Amino acid sequence: MSWTLHGDGKTIAEGDLVRPGERLSWPRTIGFGGQHVVAMFGATFLVPLLTGFPPTTTLFFSGVGTILFLVLTGNRLPSYLGSSFAFIAPIQASMKSDDMAAALFGVVVTGVLLAVVGLIVTVTGTGWIEALMPPVVTGAIVALIGLNLAGVATTNYAASPWIATITLTTIIVVAVAFRGLAARLSILIGVAVGYAAAAIGGLLDFDKVGAASWVGWPEFTTPSATWSVVPIFLPVVLVLVAENVGHVRSVAHLTDDPSLNQKTGPALLADGLATTIAGIGGGSATTTYGENIGVMTATRVFSTAAYWVAAIVAIMLGLSPKFGAVLNTIPSGVLGGVTVALYGLIGLIGVKIWMDNHVDFSQPVNQYPAAIALVIGIGNLTLTAGDMTFTGIALGTIAAIVVYHAMRTLQRFRA
């Protein structure tokens, strides 16, 4: 909980960086913490709006989860735990078939399993994860989770096409016309412009905003044990593992500190516990945020002190019901414009995993697992077994892993 002052606390020399255990002066640190709030905000508040969860509750638990993450990683691993997009599809599916309490149970189970994985990785390392989920499998799982949501995005888009088009156009223009932090905030800026257009069009209702208090506890909801929703959530564990491992490696590389890779197990444990706590209280599940890694890359400030500031600000925002009521006025057209781009981008992250790892798709052992998983996920193949329902994401994930390893085994026998 202490940091060494970097230089004079005011400047960063050319080619230098502020390391996790260092900080600049507190006014500057608070400013960098504010940048992290802005960077995480657009994605973090979108998830509860898309799933029907209370936004202020999600913000509150993202701040709590970030503090827990910093503590469990020894205050050495700078990262913000924001809302995970991997949970959108299973939460929406379970909310449709059951209710919010059931969806929260799925979140809790996922968090517990991720924490267990974290404990195992702390003891054994990450080699078994890489063996179970090589890049072709990881890429397929991430891609199908994003593309499985395409129907939800287009439905919201069709609800208010003009507002959605204005929002989407703004995102595209900002992403291309600006650089640095502004370009990374293209989704947040798109939401702001779309929201303004909706206000001009008289599409907003502020009745609940006026009735909401300025300060108060967020809306807490407890989960109910609904085992039938669990299969929908299980594939998300694999995605969270891949995200956390990737983010730890990114920070270790950017800071030129390989020892940070030793924090992979504690990072997984911390994210699992943060997700569990959020699920118990009614918040969205968490994951480490690439947006904030981008901010660190641009600013060369990797100080964990800035993340403490961001976490505290998030908790404060979560303690304002009026702020949450304002977020809930965002119309479906704006969400449609955002998600048409966002869900597609999630799918492309899977493609990027293939490209970065030079997956050879001329080989059948890579072709079939990816092809089968994508069709099952995008088509949302759904099967039932008793009270259990297996959706396209669950079945696609199972298919990717089983088909890949089965083909690899046959390949070895053939040789």
Image: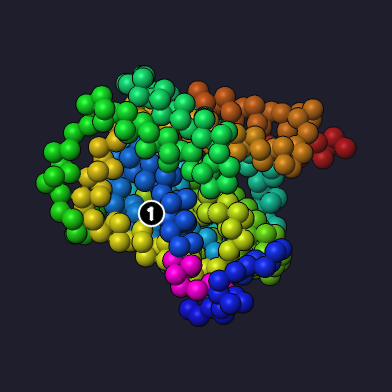
Is 279 left, or right, of 340 in this rendering?
left
Front-most of 29 and 222?
29
Is 17 left, or right, of 175 in this rendering?
right
What residue do we see at 53% from left, 78% from top?
3
What residue do we see at 82% from left, 38% from top?
413
Residue 401: tell me if it is visible: no
Front-most of 257 and 271?
257
| 40 falls in the magenta region | no
Magenta range is 22-30
Q: Which residue is mark 1?
A: 108
Rendering coords of residue 278 (x, y %): 35, 56
Quadrant of the rendered image containing residue 256: bottom right
| 29 falls in the magenta region | yes
Quadrant of the rendered image containing residue 151: top left
Rendering coords of residue 411 (x, y %): 80, 36
Rendering coords of residue 326 (x, y %): 25, 43
Q: Amino acid at mark 1?
A: Val
Is 303 left, or right, of 356 in this rendering?
left
Rendering coords of residue 248 (x, y %): 61, 59
Quadrant location of the C terminus in the rendered image: top right
Q: Is residue 254 above or below residue 405?
A: below
Quadrant of the rendered image containing residue 66: bottom left
